[in-house]
Image (spheres, rainbow, N blue to C red):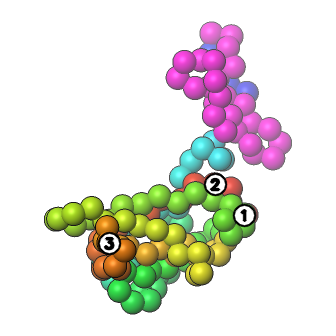
Amino acid sequence: VLKTANTTRLTMNATGQTTIVGEGGTTTTNLQNGLCKAWVNADSDASRNNGFNFDGQTDHGTGDFSYELINHMSATNAYSQSGLARASTDAQIITRNTTRDTAGVVAVEVGEHDGSLVDRHHDIQIVGELA
């Protein structure tokens, strides 16, 4: 327990669950569930420029990529994924490829607004419970 001015600011239980007091002082955040568990900044061929908690990558074809997690998520579909693709024109869309997704593999497709897949530089973030 961490206290300042006789007010609890941080608690940690025997299993390592850590909770901190939020900015307003009335809410708390669980650090284990409130942090990004993995992220990657990748080129249009899935090569990783930078990232966290990813160990391998595969380019399955145009706009179809997967990334292997070092520390797996608790289950398939037990996490939330977001991302963006970078292009000089038009918005690109990143969707989750559920045919390849597992607790240890994050699979995405990068597409145009018309649904066609394209190779683009992209970023992905994962939140949820680790195994």
Q: Is residue 72 above or below residue 80?
A: below
Q: Is residue 48 left or right of residue 77?
A: left
Question: Is residue 31 highlighted in magenta?
Answer: no
Label 3 neighbourhood size at 10 Å, few (<14), some (14-19), many (20+)?
few
Q: CA distance from mark 3 to mark 2?
A: 30 Å
Q: Residue at x 54, y 18 (%)?
A: 24
Image quarter (top left, top right, bottom left or bottom right) of the C terminus: bottom right
Q: Position of residue 130 (x, y in %)?
A: 68, 60
Q: Residues within 10 Å of mark 2 (few under 14, many from 20)?
A: many
Is 58 displayed left or right of 98 in the figure?
left
Residues under numbered marks 2 and 1 in contact, where contact means CB atoms less than 8 Å apart: yes
> Which mark is on residue 114?
3
Residue 77 is at least partly visible in this image: yes
Q: Residue at x 74, y 43 (%)?
A: 17
Instruction: Give the number of callouts.
Output: 3
The first of marks 2 and 1 along the sequence is: 1
Name which quarter of the figure residue 5 lies in: top right
Q: Which residue bears the numbered disc 2?
A: 128
Q: Position of residue 128 (x, y in %)?
A: 63, 54
Disc 1 secondary structure class: loop
Q: Amino acid at mark 2?
A: Gly
Name the side, left or right, on which 23 lies relative to 41. right
Residue at the disc numbered 1: 74
Q: Residue at x 51, y 70 (%)?
A: 96
Q: Amino acid at mark 1?
A: Ser
